[in-house]
Amino acid sequence: MVETAKQSSGRRALLVVDVQRDFCPGGALPAEGGDRIIPAVNRYLAEAHDLEVPVYASRDWHPAKTTHFKPYGGEWPPHCVQDTGGAQFHPRLDLQPDAIVISKGDDPGRPGYSAFEGRTPDGQPLLADLRSKRIESVYVAGLTTEYCVKQTVLDALQAGLHVVVLTDAIAGIDAHPGDADRALREMSTAGAELSAAAATLREHHRIRN
């Protein structure tokens, strides 16, 4: 028997990765088109709300001094520093109050790319929280394709989760031309499903079942 969306909603979640000011145009480390994905992300957020699918929103939450930043030997300019404007979610991102915020990158000795390195507001690791809700599939959107999105997807697969990458709702930095495309291929090869731009959470679930 095919389950209805609400009957199956406890087994899947929407994970929105790092849609923060600093990763959008005008920010410290912008992805080209980082703000152009927001309508698509918001469409998935609205659908998740309608279907009672849990929503997680990860954020980089770096200390001011971290080996992730160039002044301290890292690769990147300072960005998404705790309690600064650049670390805020993009103002047009339509997160509902019940979205679970996952903070990551707060260890000064680690880059914290993956949302699976982060924790909920009550200190629960992301994977533990997913397990407690019996989540088996995650739909992934956000920024940036070749760093935080990719590492989040790879860690989710390593944990045994089914992963759908919502390709109309991600964008990359492309610090080296082609990085984002290579990341998509790597995620696909590792077992992630790449969703067509026209997909919706409702239709995707119906097709899979």
Image (tube, rainbow, N blue to C red):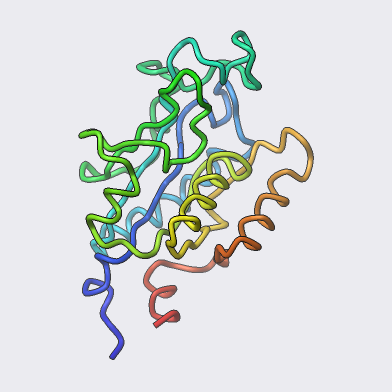
Q: Nearer the viewer, residue 6 or 32?
A: 6
Q: Position of residue 97 (x, y in %)?
A: 21, 41
- Position of 145 compared to 179: left or right? left
Q: Nearer the viewer, residue 182 or 202?
A: 182
Q: Quadrant of the N terminus?
A: bottom left
Q: Quadrant of the C terminus?
A: bottom left
Residue under the point 43% across and 56% down: 159
- Position of 33 compared to 95: left or right? right
Q: Position of residue 50 (x, y in %)?
A: 26, 62
Q: Position of residue 2 (x, y in %)?
A: 30, 86
Residue 89 in the image: above or below residue 165: above
The quarter holding residue 101 reads top left
The quarter holding residue 90 reads top left
Residue 110 in the image: above or below residue 193: above
Residue under the point 38% across and 36% down: 118
Exactly how many numbered labels are in the figure?
0
For the view shown, which residue lies furthest in the right direction? Answer: 177
Residue under the point 47% across and 28% down: 21
Q: Position of residue 105 (x, y in %)?
A: 45, 27
Residue under the point 55% across and 66% down: 193
